[in-house]
Amino acid sequence: MSAHQVVYLPGDGIGPEVASSARRVLEAADMEFDWIEKPLGLGAFEAHGDALPQDTVDAIRACGVALKGPSTTPIGGGHVSANVRLRKELELFANVRPVKTVPGLETSHGAIDLVIVRENTEDLYAGLENEVAPGVVTSLKVITDRASRRIARFAFDYAKRWERERVTAVHKANIMKLADGLFLDCAREAKEESDAAGGTIGFDDVLVDALCMHLVTNPGRYDVLLLENLYGDIVSDLAAGLIGGLGLAPGGNYGEDCAVFEAIHGSAPDIAGQGIANPIAMILSGAMMCHHLGRPDAYTRIRRGVASVTRDRKDALTPDLGGTGTTEGLTQAIIEGVQAQPQPA
């Protein structure tokens, strides 16, 4: 098999630590890569005056795929989020975050297996703000037919491709009748298109506040959740908490021509360099990248390798998972777990 050319974005904080772990696990699954390392985030801003250098964007466009470590975004000032800019620059309109119970780390919420599909380019999360007078700030919530229709179609296509059963549109159309109403209308039309094409994916919708209550009382009622940008950001963190935390939740950003895979957690600068960062979310994001690159066998081997460790090697788990292990120890245990999985036929 030829090597896949992939842009490698270590990020900052714990980013370089967990991204390096993911690289090693991917290679243990017999994936061959030609890694092209580029800067992004706080380190890029300090070195180049830009958190997202144009050279980084150009490299991802050329390769079509990237593996990205978490990066730091200053709160209340400093540079604009490199994550938000990257999604806009590359039109990575779909953010996919699978939320699945990890064997051996089951929580009181029971078995969970749902997928969050989040629109990635507009809504309040786009950060269109203006101080119209001293002490008066407006934030613009922009919802368009184009973006809403595109993400809704993606959600139904994803559900069909992964043999899921139902898409649930999440909104607040009872209050934001025009903006969220447009998003909901586009979801309903995507359902009609799916049916006309012979699809069998079910559809319903729910208010975002009701969804949050349902997720903590009966998360098994949901399958694929379709959300606007800001709702998706908040709900995906809530859902990650149901399976044990952000350290277990992978993610992928998809556009027409590019895809960027990243863990959904932050850069955790408070523990950077201590060797205790949990790399599992980053490793599982790498597994998603393998599937995207046409290697479902590597995807399966990595997920099973991780499960073998979380189920049987509690000694290797990092402190956030209740263990006393290190990033290096957990990475090595997962590598061994992956290598112990059957080779593809």
Image (cartoon, rainbow, N blue to C red):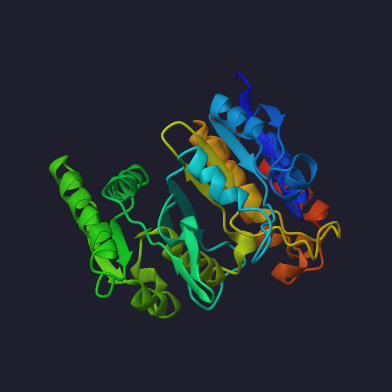
Q: Quadrant of residue 287?
A: top right
Pick the quarter of the image with the N terminus: top right
The number of numbered badges drawn on the structure is 0
For the residue pair 303 and 130, the one nearer the viewer reads as 130
The structure residue drawn at horizontal position 58% and vertical position 57%, both measured from the top left corner, is 264
Expressed as whole percent of the image width and height from the top left, the position of residue 316 reads 78, 60
Horizontal arrangement in the rendering, residue 335 relative to residue 243 (left or right): right
Q: Quadrant of residue 197?
A: top left
The structure residue drawn at horizontal position 49% and vertical position 44%, both measured from the top left corner, is 88
Identify the residue at the far left of this view.
Answer: 196
Expressed as whole percent of the image width and height from the top left, the position of residue 100 reads 50, 60
For the residue pair 139 and 43, the one nearer the viewer reads as 139
Horizontal arrangement in the rendering, residue 204 relative to residue 259 (left or right): left
Horizontal arrangement in the rendering, residue 331 relative to residue 247 (left or right): right
Residue 150 appears in view: yes
The structure residue drawn at horizontal position 70% and vertical position 29%, both measured from the top left corner, is 35
The structure residue drawn at horizontal position 57% and vertical position 44%, both measured from the top left corner, is 261
Identify the residue at the far front of this view.
Answer: 133
Expressed as whole percent of the image width and height from the top left, the position of residue 110 reads 48, 73
Residue 200 appears in view: no
Identify the residue at the far right of this view.
Answer: 274
Expressed as whole percent of the image width and height from the top left, the position of residue 126 reads 47, 55
Horizontal arrangement in the rendering, residue 265 relative to residue 219 (left or right): right
